[in-house]
Amino acid sequence: MRHIFTTIIAIATLFTAMATSPQRSTRPIYLDPDADIEERVEDALARMTLKEKIAIIHAQSKFSSPGVPRLGIAEIWCTDGPHGIRPEVLWDEWDQARWTNDSCTAYPALTCLAATWNRDIAELYGVSIGEEARFRDKDVLLGPGVNIYRTPLCGRNFEYMGEDPYLASEMVVPYIVGVQRQGVAACVKHYALNNEELHRHSVDVDLSDRALYEIYLPAFKAAVERGKAWSIMGSYNLYRGTYACHNDRLLNKILKQEWGFDGVVISDWGGTHSTDEAITGGLDLEFGSWTDGLREGASNAYDMYYMALPYLEKIECGEVGTEELDEKVRRVLRLTFRTAMNLDKPYGAMCSEAHTEAARRIGEEGIVLLHNKNNNLPIAADAKRILVVGENAIKMMTVGGGSSSLKVQHECSPLEGIDNYYANKADIIYARGYVGDVTGSYNGVETGQNLQDKRSPKQLIDEAVELAKSVDHVVFIGGLNKSEKQDCEGADRTQLALPYNQNSVIEALADATNNLTVVLISGNAVEMPWLNKVESVVQAWYLGSEAGNAIARILAGEVNPSGKLPFTFGAKLKDYPAHADGATFPNPKKVYYHDDIFVGYRGFEKRGTKPLFAFGHGLSYTKFEYSDLRLSSNEIYHDAEHGNDTLTVTLTVTNSGDRAGKEVVQLYIADSKSSLPRPKKELKGFEKVELQAGESKEVSFVIDRTALSFYDDRVAEWVAESGEFKVLVGASSADIRLKESFELK
Ligand code: BGC
């Protein structure tokens, strides 16, 4: 009886305890979404067998790693990146899987995003593409890319953010933040020094530490330190004799130790070359071994990966320990809990109206009006007949170019966009002008376009010229495309000139009309021998799903152009520092970057070479005046103990034209005297401001010593030397409107 009584009391106490104290989870810590992520990592790690640890650090298919099925630890699924979500591919092949629910929105290429110079737009981009990745159940988005635009021949420049480390840093951070807010990791690529394509698997890059730290690394550093990127992709090339995917200096010393990266280093697909180096060289997750990244690939080789059985065998025979392995596993688990097993993540969205609108807005803000004689653009409101000429007016540009190729739900070509816009306002006539690349397929995705045209170049030109004589405005739409040796992964361009006889078409049209607009669709600069003969030039990039609508709205003046160049357009190839003084390109084996820190405008300005269009250049349909530059002080101190260690720069920008517009106010710093050579000036701030006609706004920038520093490789430190500096504010690197000096003390 007593015994029963005691039991009743015990049960009652238990119920009371359950009702009053917080419910204790019976789940293991690693599955508890409320537990601290580091505790989850350690708990999971402690439960895993050696074989499970080995399994989790390499691929099980083209784009996934296996997780730990026994413990319910999820797989990690990756997707390209960086302009839209790649169609599903077969388990073991590059070919698309022919799903019918995997068409995406194509966003403008990253060169266009960089050309917006708008951090909010970069975040919008990240959120939009991140939502699509999330909806498609992807954990890692393979992008964005921030390799520096060193040469206009690099086939992959269109996937990157231009030549300036500050601009790329500012634009990459919000993109990452936007993506990762969806519970999807950004995988920033290609770390590092992947600045040419043709020999990307064999080129061995060397350069000064100064160039490394000042030019090639800052965007990656910002991605890690400020963007908090959860993963990063090692590049194919070598750096100082060791492949970047297992390069101790790049990955362990700089990325993980100096910058405190706690995410996963993922190899580029086929970028791993040695088990020993992979173990100690900082690689965490191996993908795509025995592929060339594009076409070739051994089937089902996963157990043979450098970080699969060969690693296991080395551990089992005692040749290596498990310390490095545990560290790699920790990072992969951390990534898994941040993404695949993150219960707080939103659900995402696919091909929504908001995404279409985002794609169009990004495009509209990135399009750059390069040249506009006699206010030839916007197209006159009373234009009744408009002739559109050129293959790029009709060619789908979302298929091709390498791993960024997409399968889109819709793509509005420039001609369609112009047709839609002018539906009841003007007659739109089309002439082909030239025949370039008529193919249109990538890994099983077909554009379905038949672009064949058997007419001779002369017949095509004659037709266009004849039509040009009877219209109010001629729009030539050409440039490059995504086929090999143009803007395409795995090969580089062979010339700066436009391909396919386009120069002759433009010259002939220029002779026939005084209202010629040239629209260039490309991710790279091109030569423009006809520049003085045409009225307008518009740089329109690869704009994705909404290309045509964005272009039409700019040409018609519905949207006022506000993009600025993220890289220099040189007049000739040898004007680019990377091609000057007999430098070879492309480089199958060793290359030393003799241009050093003088990349892009830094090099053009040092050599006094006038570019065709300078870094930061971009016109508007209105005019902006700059006035009233003020510094909060003429002195700035190294440390706050002696005086202010920051300086505020304020100026006024006025829209003095008769329509609303946006201006990118650019702030450059010049060091008057220094112990090492420095560029004539460097971008250290920018703000995009929207102004109604007649409106003025104040724009302010805060400068601190980071904006004044250079990397002194004699002491391996960032140094700001006392003395005079200048603040230069303007509308481009070549159009400085206001100047002031101050002293660093
Ligand atoms: C490219 C990467 C891409 C990967 C997966 C590689 O060839 O260099 O940028 O993410 O393939 O498609």
Image: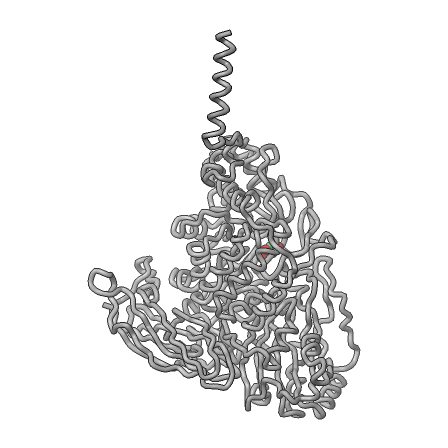
Q: How many marks?
A: 0
What colour-coding does the image apply? one colour
- Looking at this view, name the residue that lies furthest to the right: 454
Quadrant of residue 353 in the image?
A: bottom right
Query: Looking at the image, is 646 positioned above or below residue 62?
Result: below
Location of residue 193 in the rendering, given as x and y in whole percent from the top left corner: 49, 60
Query: Looking at the image, is 342 positioned above or below residue 734?
Result: above
Location of residue 474 in the rendering, given as x and y in whole percent from the top left corner: 66, 86
Quadrant assignment for ligand 1: bottom right
The reply to whether residue 733 is in sight is: yes
Residue closest to the eye, 123 or 727: 123
Residue closest to the eye, 18 or 481: 18
Give the position of the C terminus as an image quadrant: bottom left
- Looking at this view, name the residue that lies furthest to the left: 642
Location of residue 490 in the rendering, given as x and y in whole percent from the top left corner: 61, 61
Residue closest to the eye, 76 or 201: 76
366 sits to left or right of 700: right
Residue at the spot 48% in from the left edge and 60% down from the top edge: 174
The reply to whether residue 615 is in sight is: no
Residue at the spot 70% in from the left edge and 85% down from the top edge: 426
Residue closest to the eye, 85 or 37: 37
Location of residue 269 in the rendering, given as x and y in whole percent from the top left corner: 59, 52
616 sits to left or right of 362: left
Query: Looking at the image, is 616 positioned above or below residue 201?
Result: below
